[in-house]
Image: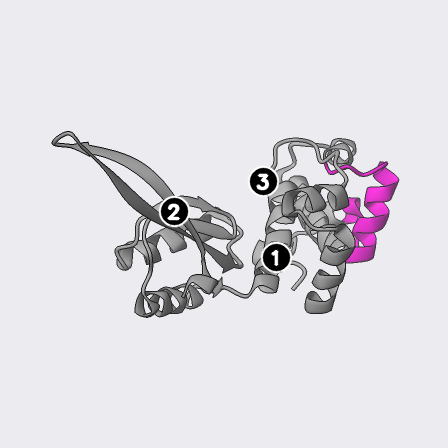
């Protein structure tokens, strides 16, 4: 079972009746596919609660629980997550691919800072892998490149910002790290078939759920 999870042992001092005891506290890190929103986090919390599992940390794409988990509970958790469109994963390459996606989703959709970063350097640093390896692994398994995946998410985020109507197109271009409004407009039209100004005039502005972008 240990090959399926990241297992951490922490030595915690415990004093009772003048005896120093060492308690080994086990925590397990689990990785979950398509867990890309706060709604997904709520679903995961609910499924863990049903099984009496105690959550320590929850983030996009991964959780850490306080205890070991039996095969039966793992299967029940996997079934519960699957019914909500989520997937418990344990293959090392699948986990790495999902972590690439999660980092991109976090930066594009949930970061308040302007994306003045080099994604290739950032991914390499965060995942401790050469970018060429990450890029090849991703494209071989997903059928698109990391760059195409990033562009798809950036365009969807641009749509969202235009619908909110709090920023003008120049501000959006700057926030999303485009070199110019012309660059944003060109990429937007290539992906959607519309110019940004035309998109804003549409009555029914199509949006893609985050978990389906780039799939």
Magenta region, residue range: 176-198
Residue 158 x %, y %: 70, 44
Residue 60 x %, y %: 51, 48
Q: Is residue 207 above or below residue 93?
A: above
Residue 86 visible in rendering: no
Which residue appears at 69% of the width and 66% of the height? 142
The colour style of the image is one colour
Taking depth in this image into account, of 12 and 27 the one nearest to the observer is 12
**Quick one: SS at disc 1?**
helix
Closer to us: mark 1 or mark 2? Answer: 2
Residue 35 x %, y %: 50, 55
Residue picked out by circle 3: 110
Residue picked out by circle 2: 9
Nearest to N terminus: mark 3 or mark 1: 1
Residue picked out by circle 1: 96
Nearest to N terminus: mark 1 or mark 2: 2
Which residue appears at 28% of the width and 59% of the height? 51
Main SS of residues in magenta: helix
- Magenta includes 106? no
Q: What separation in Å lies between label 3 and label 1 (alpha carbons)?
A: 20 Å
Q: What separation in Å lies between label 1 and label 2 (alpha carbons)?
A: 23 Å
Taking depth in this image into account, of 69 and 114 the one nearest to the observer is 69
Q: Residue furthest left?
A: 17
Residue 49 visible in rendering: yes
Q: Residues within 10 Å of mark 3 (few under 14, many from 20)?
A: few
Closer to us: mark 2 or mark 3? Answer: 2
Q: Which of the 4 quarters of the picture holds residue 207? A: bottom right
């Amino acid at each position: 079972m240990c090959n399926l999870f990241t297992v951490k042992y922490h030595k915690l001092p415990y004093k009772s009746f003048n005896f120093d005891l060492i308690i080994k506290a086990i925590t397990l890190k689990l990785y979950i596919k398509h867990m890309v929103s706060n709604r997904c986090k709520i679903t995961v919390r609910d499924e863990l609660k049903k099984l009496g599992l105690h959550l320590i940390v929850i983030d996009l794409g991964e959780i850490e629980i306080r205890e070991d988990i039996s095969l039966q509970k793992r299967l029940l958790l996997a079934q519960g997550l699957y019914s909500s469109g989520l997937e418990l994963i344990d293959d090392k390459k699948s986990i790495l691919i999902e972590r690439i996606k999660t980092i991109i989703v976090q930066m594009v959709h949930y970061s308040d800072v302007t994306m003045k970063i080099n994604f290739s350097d950032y991914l390499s640093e965060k995942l401790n892998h050469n970018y060429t390896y990450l890029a090849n692994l991703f494209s071989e398994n997903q059928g698109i490149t990391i760059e195409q995946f990033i562009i798809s998410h950036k365009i969807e985020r641009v749509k969202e910002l235009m619908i909110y109507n709090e920023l003008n197109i120049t501000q959006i271009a700057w926030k999303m790290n485009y070199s110019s409004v012309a660059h944003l407009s060109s990429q937007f039209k290539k992906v959607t078939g519309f110019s940004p100004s035309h998109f804003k005039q549409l009555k029914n502005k199509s949006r893609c759920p985050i978990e389906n972008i780039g799939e």
